[in-house]
Image: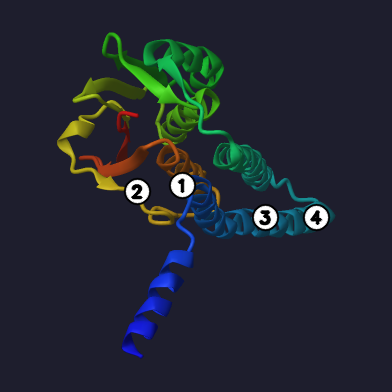
């Protein structure tokens, strides 16, 4: 009798399906989407409230300049979040083929594409990539990740500050640090946790960095964060060898 029960239990365990890489990717995507829902809803709700108040102001002949600025930021945030959401979805469902990318060349492309954004805010972009540093992964998602990190810091900069990026390879692992001209390497980096740094609906940080973390984890990487001396944050993207 006992042997019979043991046989049944063993056979049952054999029938339990093992998680495939595709299923793991879907789990990562699902966790990210659940985390992002609150931020999207918060921005939409805030936008709707400001639209209602704007109508009230117009009826009463007020000039709601500040309210319009908030609405413009909220709309820009929604467009950005939607783009990032699409990028995560595409990567989760994409094939696992990878390609080699030279990090310095990728940064040159990003610097050129973000030049006008930096110029209009009078903020500088500085990057130093160790010679020969390369990444293996999905080209479009890697570019989205790095661009998202650059723009996240740009939005936190004050006039005449500098967004600094350092990329290097150590023991076959590639890492990129992002900060605002401060010594991010002096801080203690902790793994990013979904939702940990959500602050206000229009800060543009929660979904963006949660997306970067999800895309990194889908490519043998991770996003980590540390608190810098001025209480702002420094970030690091790290990728293990394939």
Is residue 68 toward the left or the right of residue 22 in the image? Answer: right
Q: Position of residue 192 (x, y in %)?
A: 34, 48
Q: Are marks 4 and 1 in contact (CB under 8 Å)?
A: no
Up-down relation of residue 129 to residue 180 (above or below): above
Q: Earlier in the sequence, mark 3 or mark 4?
A: 3
The C terminus sits in image quarter: top left
Q: Secondary structure at mark 1?
A: helix
> In the rendered image, which residue does mark 1 sit on?
210
> In the rendered image, which residue does mark 3 sit on?
44
Mark 1: give few (<14), some (14-19) or many (20+) Cα within 10 Å: many
Q: Are marks 4 and 2 in contact (CB under 8 Å)?
A: no
Circle nearer the viewer, 4 or 2: 2
Q: Earlier in the sequence, mark 4 or mark 1?
A: 4
- Measure how far apart labels 3 and 4 are at the Cα level: 17 Å
- Measure how far apart labels 4 and 1 are at the Cα level: 34 Å
> In the rendered image, which residue does mark 2 sit on?
192
Q: Position of residue 61 (x, y in %)?
A: 80, 51
Q: Earlier in the sequence, mark 3 or mark 2?
A: 3
Indicate which disc residue 130 carries. none
Up-down relation of residue 193 to residue 137 (above or below): below
Mark 4: give few (<14), some (14-19) or many (20+) Cα within 10 Å: few
237 vs 46, nearest the viewer: 237
- Measure how far apart labels 4 and 2 are at the Cα level: 40 Å
- Measure how far apart labels 3 and 2 are at the Cα level: 25 Å
> In the rendered image, which residue does mark 4 sit on?
55
Residue that protrudes farthest toward the right in the picture: 59
Q: How many marks?
A: 4
Residue drawn at x 33%, y 83% as measured from the top left? 3
102 vs 27, nearest the viewer: 27
Q: Secondary structure at mark 3?
A: helix
Up-down relation of residue 58 to residue 235 (above or below): below
């Amino acid at each position: 009798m006992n042997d019979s029960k043991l046989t049944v239990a063993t056979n049952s365990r054999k029938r339990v399906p093992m998680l495939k890489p595709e299923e793991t990717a879907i789990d990562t995507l699902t966790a990210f989407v659940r985390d992002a829902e609150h931020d999207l809803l918060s921005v939409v709700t805030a936008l709707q409230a400001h639209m209602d108040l704007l109508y009230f102001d117009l009826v009463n002949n007020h000039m709601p300049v500040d309210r319009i600025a908030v609405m413009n930021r909220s709309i820009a945030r929604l467009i950005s979040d939607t783009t990032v959401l699409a990028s995560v979805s595409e990567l989760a469902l994409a094939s696992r083929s990878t390609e080699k990318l030279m990090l310095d060349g990728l940064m040159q492309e990003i610097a050129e594409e973000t030049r006008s954004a930096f110029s209009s805010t009078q903020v500088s972009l500085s990057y130093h990539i160790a010679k020969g540093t390369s990444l293996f992964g999905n080209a479009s998602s890697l570019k989205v990740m790095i661009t998202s990190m650059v723009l996240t810091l740009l939005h936190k900069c004050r006039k005449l500050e500098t967004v600094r990026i350092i990329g290097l390879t150590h023991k076959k692992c590639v890492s990129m640090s992002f900060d605002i001209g401060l010594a991010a390497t002096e801080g203690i980096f902790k793994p990013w946790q979904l939702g940990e740094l959500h602050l206000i609906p229009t800060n543009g940080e929660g979904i963006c960095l949660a997306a970067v973390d999800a895309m990194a984890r889908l490519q043998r990487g991770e996003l980590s964060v540390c608190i810098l001396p001025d209480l702002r944050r420094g970030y690091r993207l790290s990728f293990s060898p394939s």
